[in-house]
Image (spheres, helix red, strand yellow):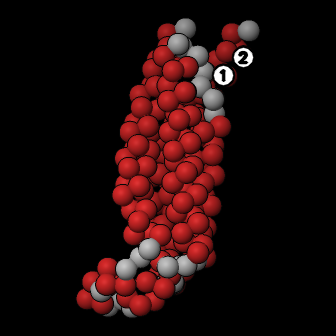
Amino acid sequence: MKDRANRLNNTKVWNIILMVITGISVLWGLLALPSTLNPQRKAYDYLEELGLDPERMYRHADTLPVKIVFIAGLLLAVGLLFLYFRNHRQLKNNQLPDKRPYLIFIGWQIFDMLFSLVYDPMKANQLTFSGIISLLITYLIYCGIPLVILNNIRMIEKEQKLSL
C-alpha cells in the first residue's frame, strides 16, 4: 500500500509539472498567435545574418498547413490542460488518473515531429544525421514526463492485479 501511495504522489508531482509546462505553452502560443496568423516579412531578416534564406522561411511560415498545425496544437494544449487538472483532482483523491491525455500528448508529439521532418523549408532536419538525432532527442525530452506518468500508472495497475 505504501508503494501505491508513493507512486500516486510521484504521479501527482509529475502531473503538476506537466500542467505548469502546458500552461506556459498555452500562454506562449496565445502570445504568438497574431504573428503566426499574420507573419511579417521583416521579422525574418535576422536569418540572413545566420546564412539562411529569410524569404524562404517567411513563405514557409505564411502557409496554411503551418497555421493549421499551430492552431490545432494550441487548441489541443488547452484541452490537455483541462484534462491534466481533472487528473490532478483524481490523484488528490488517491484515484488513478485517466491515461488518455498523456497518450494524446505523445501522439501529438509524434505527429508534430513528422510534420517538422516532412514540412521543413530549409531541409535542415532531413539533410543531416545530427539534425534528425537532435529532433528525436528534443521530442523524447518532451515525451519524458508523460512516459514517467504512464509508467507509474502501469506499475500501480500491475500491483493492484497482483494483490487481487
Q: Position of residue 110 (x, y in %)?
A: 60, 58
Q: Position of residue 144 (x, y in %)?
A: 49, 45
Quarter assignment of residue 87: top right
- On the question of residue 3 being in view, the answer is no
Q: Position of residue 150 (x, y in %)?
A: 58, 35
- Mark 1 secondary-structure assignment: helix
Q: Position of residue 13 (x, y in %)?
A: 41, 28
Q: What kind of residue is marked 2?
A: Lys
Q: Is residue 42 left or right of residue 124?
A: left
- Compared to residue 125, the image places residue 13 above or below, namely above
Quadrant housing the N terminus:
top right
Question: Label 2, on which residue?
Answer: 161
CA–CA distance between discs 2 and 1? 6 Å
Quadrant housing the C terminus:
top right
Whether label 2 touches label 1, CB < 8 Å: yes
- Residue at the image point whose x is 44% and y is 44% from the top: 22
- Residue at the image point whose x is 44% and y is 39% from the top: 18
- Residue at the image point whose x is 36% and y is 58% from the top: 31
